[in-house]
Amino acid sequence: MKILVIGGGGREHAVVWKLAQSRRVTKIFCAPGNAGIAEQAECVPIAATDVAALTAFAVERQIDFTVVGPEAPLCAGIVDALAARGRRAFGPSRQAAQLEGSKVFAKRFLLKYGIPTARMEVFTEVGPALECVRRWGAPVVVKADGLAAGKGVIVAQAVAEAEQAVVNILEKKVFGAAGRQVIIEECLTGPEASVMAFVDGQTYRLMSPAQDHKRVSDGDTGPNTGGMGAYSPTPAVAPALEKTIRDIFDRTLAGLREEGMDYRGVLYAGLMLTPTGPQVLEFNCRFGDPETQAVLPRLEGDLLDVLEATAAGRLTEAQLTWTRDTAVCVVLAAGGYPGDYVKGQPIRGLKEAGQLAKVCVFHAGTKRNAAGEIVTDGGRVLGVTALGTDLAGAVRQAYAAVERIHFDGMQYRRDIAARGLPRSQT
Ligand SMILES: Nc1ncnc2c1ncn2[C@@H]1O[C@H](COP(=O)(O)OP(=O)(O)O)[C@@H](O)[C@H]1O
Ligand SMILES: [Mg+2]
């Protein structure tokens, strides 16, 4: 089978790497891909957001199955566009992708179907939104409705900060049309966990839970990023919580059916594990990044079988088993990220790191320069994943691999998964 993977980050490298192990896969294209993905796939220079060009490519090259990584093309309707041209794809329709594409849509859905989530109000006018912020007081959360590349949520510790966020979103339009509506939301507390599930329209199968590390620096300090590392499974999601999490997905699927929404793909629930139980912060309509870099290496068997079964509504027939290993992914980022950073720094030690047992070095922002060297080409540059029989072992192995890699300005967190380890081992 000929496969097209859309995207060019660490998530897509993990997907391509896993699909390349499938006996049924004869050829993988990746648009736009990166220098690591190029080892297993033919990269094609089409942006992940260019739905028309991607669809034309899939038709022209007779791609059997397209796997969509990022949310933007899903929310823009790429799966519908491919289906209209007779091309099968993995990911939700444009309508179903609204669960990520519109936070207002998702919150209304959650509240309508009695799924635990923070209280909220929605506004399109500055005045009433400011009035709400003052009435609620701090801390309070302000969210832009639409896709904002992870920058649309402000957890305000003071009323003035929340007011500023409201003005930035509704009046200054810093997120453009994504900020036509704003959500004022109750501030919850607790550790966070990511639970992803394959959903085939009728049923779902949970992947094992993961924990992401959003802040750029150790001890969860500094600005938010796309994610600086992840590990899976996580002891934060105690077995006692599994029933509640199943209940969240049961209600979600029942709600989707009720709404007449045929959701097929990965549904990712961002949860906050509050003192009164897990609550849904948000849904994503695709694999998480970096979570996927810690989850897919633990999948036994053929990823293509699972993705095809999901897309075909035959998920119950799919073989979905996970190794008992724990996986830890440490993201290596460019100096300055998530602010300004330089590109084009040569990366050393990739081979040496990749030779370590049970280590995968996934590329996120890399390319080959004119001299053929692999150089940095983004904020998040690499995701170094190690498997171990226990979390401590996986952490040790991941950092052993990290130590073999170098590029100028390289920064990473030293405490990935530390929260999951007993105090004595951190
Ligand atoms: N109601 C809330 N209370 C406390 N923190 C929140 C709340 N909603 C979101 N957050 C924080 O903001 C982060 C980003 O919010 P999220 O809804 O996941 O949006 P996105 O990932 O699209 O930026 C969350 O990971 C969480 O840390
Ligand atoms: Mg999130």
Image (cartoon, rainbow, N blue to C red):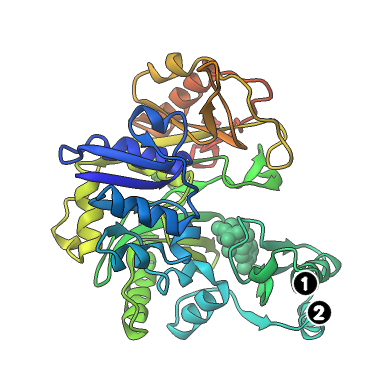
Residue farthest front in this picture: 60
Q: Looking at the image, do the residues carrying marks 1 and 2 touch, with CB atoms under 8 Å apart?
A: yes
Which numbered dot is residue 394? none
Residue 75 appearing in the image? yes
Q: Is residue 198 left or right of residue 421?
A: left
Label 1, label 2: how many angstroms apart (C-alpha)? Answer: 7 Å
| Label 2 environment density (alpha carbons within 10 Å; few <14, some 14–19, many ≥20) | many
Between residues 200 and 189, which one lies in front from this camera angle?
200
N-terminal-most mark, 1 or 2: 2
Rendered residue at 36%/46% (across/down):
5
Rendered residue at 50%/59% (across/down):
72
x, y percentage for residue 335? 69, 30
Which amino acid type is marked by label 1? Answer: Val
Indicate the quadrant containing the N terminus: top left, top right, bottom left or bottom right: top left
What residue would you read off at disc 1? 166
Rendered residue at 52%/29% (across/down):
367
**Circle 1 — which element?**
helix
Residue farthest right in this picture: 160
x, y percentage for residue 108? 52, 81
Between residues 119 and 123, which one lies in front from this camera angle?
123
Indicate the quadrant containing the C terminus: top left, top right, bottom left or bottom right: top right
What residue would you read off at disc 2? 130
| Mark 1 CB lies closer than 8 A to ligand 1 | no
Is residue 324 depicted above or below 351 in this figure? below
x, y percentage for residue 266? 36, 59
Is residue 63 depicted above or below 112 in this figure? above
Rendered residue at 68%/42% (across/down):
338
Which amino acid type is marked by label 2? Answer: Leu
